[in-house]
Amino acid sequence: MKHLTPRCIVAELDRYVVGQDKAKRSVAIAVRNRWRRQQLPPDIREDVVPKNIIMIGPTGVGKTEIARRLAGLVDAPFVKVEASRYTEVGYHGRDVESIIRDLVETAYNMVMLEERGQVIEKARAKAEDEILESLLPPVELDGVVDAAEHSRRLESHERTKDKIRTKLRSGELDERDVEITSEEKAIPTVEIISSQGVEQMGVDFQNMFERLVPTKQVTRKIKVGEAREMLTQQAAEAMSDREKVRREAVKRAEETGIVFLDEIDKIAATSKKDGGGPDVSREGVQRDLLPIVEGTSVLTRYGIVRTDHILFMAAGAFHSAKPSDLVPELQGRFPIRVELGDLGKDEFMRILTEPRNALTRQYAELMGADGVHVEFTADALEQVAEVAVQANRAMQNIGARRLHTVLETLMEDVSFDAPEMSGKTVKIDAAYVRERLQDIIEDEDLSRYIL
């Protein structure tokens, strides 16, 4: 993070998200401030809280993508949740703290992968030794009294073992059968019906059953390649320091965790002139979320997690509601608000050409798997962008997601026939686009159905 300046973060986000410079700058500053906070003296550090962000804009303009790419860039635990899920039928004070438990679970999996990566070489060596013991019969030393003969047999056994190890590592023995003995636990599946979450009850039933159920030795015959992978994973897990991973996971969730609250406008109270007045359940969800955003302690299976320094990024279209419709206390916890603009033809052209994962490149690579070379001309891309703009204007504006529907329709014939077209080149130009899409665009009902 020391070298990951706001300018570098924005430059990295530019590789995946077109436009929305204001939103990128805001999230880059928020993430950089987390690193700056770590450099402060402890007495000041605790009082510096993250500057939570609300991103306002229609669907398909890059809100979720910015948050997801940002979390991946800084290697932070990330969880996305739709705020509207807590207003669904059956909402009965559903535990919104499950958001934090999901975040810690993500952090734990991240740290566990790192921990296993540090011991993977030792685990692989241990797995190889177990397989070699099964493949190679033990050296016969019974009745050997001559020291020279004893030494010769041992050296011969080691040379044979090294030769088999070389073949094992090269994959020559992957299809050979081998008998492997491993430890397994028959852990029962228990479903607990409760108005509270299991974590709220203060008991980790899964780990409790793992400790109670005895292990048993199971011998089975499997392929060497499968056995090597299975034994390596088992050894890596056994070598991992679970307590260390647990502590680091809690710390990482607290210090670098990012929670993305999507559809937050769906829990904002609608204005009275729309009829019905404020929705009690919506405001109730806001009240439930408030302590988590403000800073509280949440009980998880890995320990107590403080939410004071978790970064919350909220997003919503805010078509029928405004950020000011949120309860004042929750508004105050999201001091930074950025508006993401609608995407037009120019932005669609950039989306089709600039990002590393541009849709045109994705389709070209997909067809390349069948041996078909696809070329998109500049005028074809311009025509596709124009069609997407028209479709968004005539129907609901779904932003860049409209490009997916347009391109999928455009490429349908090529995708279907690609296996029989191996070795051929397909040139997608403006005429091709008009031929495939013109009838759909002109027929409004068909356009709504297909695009």
Image: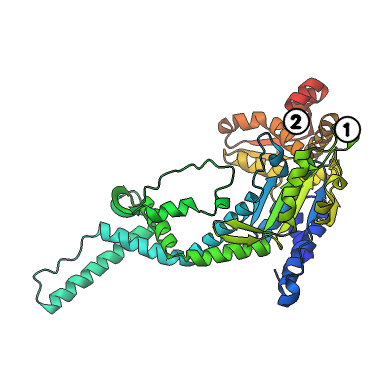
Q: Quadrant of the C terminus?
A: top right
Rendering colour mode = rainbow
Task: Say which of 198 and 441 sits in front.
Answer: 198
Q: Earlier in the sequence, mark 1 or mark 2?
A: 1
| Residue in the picture at 83% in, 35% down | 389
CA distance separating discs 1 and 2:
47 Å
- Location of residue 100 by image quarter: bottom right
The answer to whether the residue labelled 1 contacts the one labelled 2, judged by CB atoms less than 8 Å apart, is: no
Q: Would residue 363 be seen by someone viewing this image from the given angle?
A: yes
Question: Residue 6: x, y in percent?
Answer: 78, 64
Q: Amino acid at mark 2?
A: Tyr
Residue 124 vertical position relative to residue 416 in the rendered view, above or below = below
Residue 211 versus residue 436: which sits nearer the camera?
Answer: 211
Position of residue 374 measured from the top left corner of the image (x, y, whole percent): 67, 39
**As drawn, is 3 to the left or to the right of 243?**
right
Which quadrant of the view contains residue 425? top right
From this view, report whether residue 178 is shown above or below residue 89: below
Count every numbered label the image shows and give the total.
Answer: 2
Q: Position of residue 434 (x, y in %)?
A: 79, 28
Residue sitting at 91 percent across and 33 percent down? 273
Residue highlighted by disc 1: 274
Which residue matches tag 2? 432
Q: Quadrant of residue 417?
A: top right
- The quadrant of the image that shows the N terminus is bottom right
Front residue of 144 and 339: 339
